[in-house]
Amino acid sequence: MESSFAHITIIHWVAVVIYVIATIFNVAGIMFRKERAVSIGYAIVLIGLLVHGVGLLWWWRIVGHGPYIGRFEVLSSHAWAVLALFLLSTKYLPRIKPASILVFPVTFLMIAVGLFIEPQAKLLPPTLRSVWLVLHVIFYKISLFTLLVALAFSLFFILRKRTGISWLQRLPEQEIMDILAFRFAGFSFTFWGIAMVAGSIWAYQSWGRFWGWDPVETWSLMTWISFGIYLHLRRFFGWNGERAAYLYLICFVLSVISLLFTPLIGSSIHAEYFK
Amino acid sequence: MLKRFFLSRSTILTLLVLILGAVVVGYLFPQRFLLSPAGMDRWELDNPLLAALSRKLALDHVYTSPWFAVLLALFLISLLFSSWEQFRLALRRTREGGGGGKELALSCSPAGAESIARKFGYLRVGADGDVVRLVKHPWGYWGNFLLHLGIVVAIAASLIILLYERRASVELVPGEVHAPGAPWAQQDLGLLAGKFVLPEAVRLDRVIPEFWPNGHLKQLTTDFTFIDQAGRQTPYSMHVNKTLRHRGIRIFQGKTFGRAFYVGFRDGKGGWQGDLLMVDNRFSGEKAPFKEFILPWAPATVRAKYYPAADRRSPVGENPLLVMQLVKGGKIIDELSLTTGATGKFAGREATLVETGWWGGIIFIDTRGMEGIFFAFVVIAIGGGLSYLCPPRELRVVRDGGGCRLTWRASRFAELYQEEFDRLCHECSVAGTGAGGRPLPDGSHKG
């Protein structure tokens, strides 16, 4: 078991190194308008995704359950899912490619944080054997991906407006970035809602109650309502541009707290899985 | 007037902000249903001003307070009006499409333009004389309506559950019977729910916990039997995540279970007193918490915990070690550890651990509305998908002399799909030129 852990740690570190190299190529390519460098970056990141995927599958085989209990496996699978979804989405929405400036580094940072926490095998409690849990987890991962894309465009919008950084001018027009942030925030709202409802069905199956105002549930609901307010202000009150981007940043911070920190609150029923 | 008020953007925004505020308050103020009575008393003593405010405004039970129910009801009404409006809008758009858009005159024939549009995924949805209407993703018109409808159903179902749910649990040892109307170990009743009485008696037959080698729970199975008034028995077996239904009542595996210790205490005069100590299964080494018991004969509070094995180290075992302490004023005045069959002195009496077994909990729920939550899940998923993944793009092809005039619009995110229209126009132009035509001078681009 110990040697397997060591192998998985090495594989993950290899993936981190590959992702870092890919990020360098990608960012340099975007900054200096070198299409070839961007293409090489994408090719490298794809290799990283494969290596990373092998590590995750191996981990899955060792611990005997999906990556949704331990913090290491959660962060690593978040990173993999975000990157895989991003690469897939760029096939259909090539305009979101500049978001890679943020998505690629976030990916390797999540893995690195997971590795510093140290991989630990956790045994599956009976409540986690449910298809609704799998849906709950999958939709939050999709949501994290959409959140990061919207974050990237909101940040680019603010930075381009507030700073004179020249390479930012090479990104899509402000109007397009604003719309992309809006659209992906809409995706986040939808997927977050679906994840919450799937979670409540799972809770009903496991504990006989669909909502218990657990800290995780409460924060998740607060985040969802905040996104509802953001979308409402954008759609019906004409909020756009910089102030919408700042409001999005607040919503994003809430979502990060909900996703990554509230499950650690001791009084939460989720804590027994993550601590 | 009323409809306008509920459909007003400001009303909806205000309600959203108020609900968010209520949830934040519910998170910041300790809630009675989440905290033990002792914990609540402690908080009130430490924060007298906040406690007074909390009591006055029902901030200690936000989600069951009348003002929160009113807030939710107002939001629901607003959403209902909004959903109706969205329905009408979707119907109108499906039938007629939206107005305006970018316009371009081309030399391509209308049939040629239609054929090219079809290659881009546009579907013919209507024709009127020289005008053909094509839409890409016409079902996308219904996304917003479905998203709203899903949220309405989820809130309505939650309200029904909140008002009418009857939920109760029992904690029994094997062989013990819970008769209809007997007191529950725990119960939660909705605001409008009546008394919860089981239609039949229930007997616990067996509790079978399975553990991983590290002592964590792997599976928990409970066998039990319903016994009706005529004595007919209906046996069941359930485990975590497997729910049962009996005469309209849903039954869930309880979260709590543990070891039940039957301890006999003999006083100096030979008098015998037997007590059942049902201790929760929470193995965490030396840190395993004690459970308190009030035994009428004992001069102080008795608290107990157990180790799965007598060596106090093994996380799993068949011969548990019971540890009892007598506590007065926070001080331990007596302590005794026993395995099955062992005897020792405790609280001035001779204590014998006669027998051990597993006890378990069963949850009974009589609720309506859960189906609504499942339905909402599907509707929100479809609505969200349609709304953000499939925004409809409308194309009108109008015969214009030998060529045609195209009018294009996207119901949302038009800027993102402009390229699609440009590509479509380009192909139409190429087709028109190939057929011997030529693009009309200046393209008459009005976009």
Image: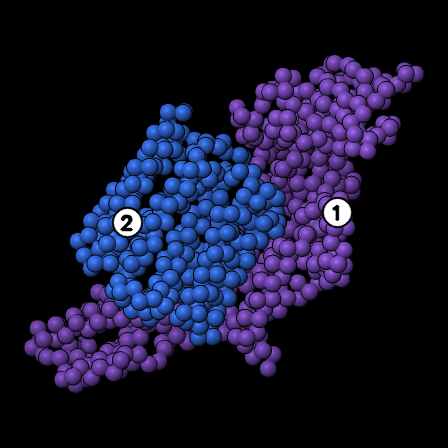
Please state the chain letter of the residue tagged with numbered disc 1 in the rendered image: B
x then y, percent, for residue B194: 74, 53
Query: Do tags 2 and 1 sit on the same chain?
Result: no
- Location of the N terminus of chain B by quadrant is bottom right
Q: Residues within 10 Å of mark 1 (few under 14, many from 20)?
A: few
Check the picture and name the quadrant holding the C terminus of chain B.
bottom left
Asked if one can make out residue A257 in the rendered structure from this viewpoint, the answer is: yes
**Figure colour of chain B:** purple
Residue at mark 2: chain: A
| Percent x, y of residue B169 | 69, 40
Residue B120 has which mark? none
For badge 2, the amino acid type reads Thr
Q: Residue at x 66, y 63 (%)?
A: B68
Residue toward you, B347 or B222: B347
Q: Secondary structure at mark 2?
A: helix
Q: Residue at left 58%, top 49%?
A: A215
Query: Disc 1 on helix, strand or loop?
Result: helix
Q: Position of residue A257 (x, y in %)?
A: 50, 52
Residue A214 as seen in the image, left or right of residue B350: left
Residue type at tag 1: Arg
Q: Nearer the viewer, residue A236 or B355?
A: A236
Residue under label 1: B42
Q: Quadrant location of residue B292?
A: top right
- Measure the alpha-carbon separation of dots 2 and 1: 53 Å
Going by the image, does A233 lie left or right of A86? Answer: right
- Answer above or below: position of B31 versus B422: above
The image shows residue A171 at horizontal and vertical percentages of 27, 64
The one of B140 and A193 positioned closer to us in this rendering: A193
Which color was chain A given? blue
Which residue is at 33% across, 37% downward? Answer: A13
Residue highlighted by disc 2: A23
